[in-house]
Image: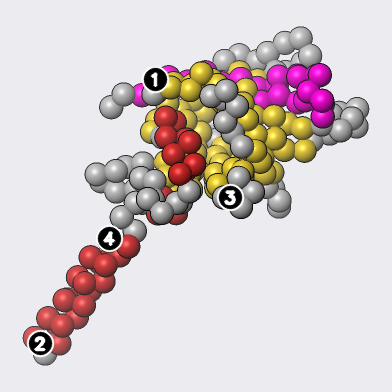
Amino acid sequence: MRTVALIVVLALTNTLVYAQDLYQYRSSDVYPFGQPHPDAPKEITDYGPLIGISDCKSIARISPTDWADTIAMEWHFKYIMNGWGVQDETYKTDGVHSGSIRQYNADSAQWYVTYYSSSTATPSLTTWAGDPRDGGDFILYAPQKAPNGMDGFFKIRFSEISNKGFKWEGAWVDPAEAINYATWKIYCKKRVD
């Protein structure tokens, strides 16, 4: 009986060690935000400066001329899927939280970013796409009509990205980007642990 128990313990130990080696790029005590997988496309590190926790101020438009009060927010970024993707989550003091899954597709040379929120459970999530590097900014688009029915996009822009922080803006734009109507802005400072 002891021999069987020892064999089971050894088998479980080997399985755990194998799983740790196999999934070594996921979040761990040593790497709480995961690591980029070395076999993933090199673009997986595009979001590297954002990985970790940032303390942010979020402000949203409430009318064509007015903005709501600023809301404090934490923005967490980490590598997921054993270093093949990036996930972010927001924790806002107004109780509305959100997040995204970010995956890079080497065939299309684009990032695909799927967004979800605690404010509404949707049957189909919105996905932004784009090659986020434009003069150092990350820019992504999702088709969205204006309230008057005009074709356009909701454009996301991460700017002023550094290891110290970043800015984020969400805006409706027409296809030519002659109209750029910002509806949400976020200002973040990287938390130093």
| Three-letter amino acid code at the position of disc 4 | Gln
Magenta highlight range: 170-191
Q: Earlier in the sequence, mark 3 or mark 1?
A: 3
Residue 60: % across, % down = 65, 20
Q: Quadrant of the C terminus?
A: top left
Q: Earlier in the sequence, mark 4 or mark 3?
A: 4
**Which residue is denoted by mark 4 in the rendering?**
20
Q: Is residue 172 magenta?
A: yes
Where is 102 relative to 4, above or below? Answer: above
Along the line of sight, which residue is nearer the eye, 159 or 72?
159
| Three-letter amino acid code at the position of disc 2 | Thr
**Which residue is denoted by mark 2 in the rendering?**
3
Residue 132 is marked as none
Q: Residue at x 76, y 9 (%)?
A: 65
Q: Earlier in the sequence, mark 1 or mark 4?
A: 4
Would you call the spot at circle 3 few (<14 residues within 10 Å), some (14-19), or many (20 or more)? some
Report the Cα–Cα distance between label 3 and label 1: 28 Å
Report the Cα–Cα distance between label 1 and label 4: 32 Å
Where is 169 relative to 95, above or below? Answer: above
Locate residue 54: give its quadrant: top left
| Three-letter amino acid code at the position of disc 1 | Lys
Would you call the spot at circle 1 few (<14 residues within 10 Å), some (14-19), or many (20 or more)? some
Q: Earlier in the sequence, mark 2 or mark 1?
A: 2
Q: Residue at x 60, y 45 (%)?
A: 109
Residue 164 is marked as 1
**Dominant SS in magenta:** strand
**Which residue is denoted by mark 3 in the rendering?**
105
Would you call the spot at circle 2 few (<14 residues within 10 Å), some (14-19), or many (20 or more)? few
Residue 142: % across, % down = 72, 38
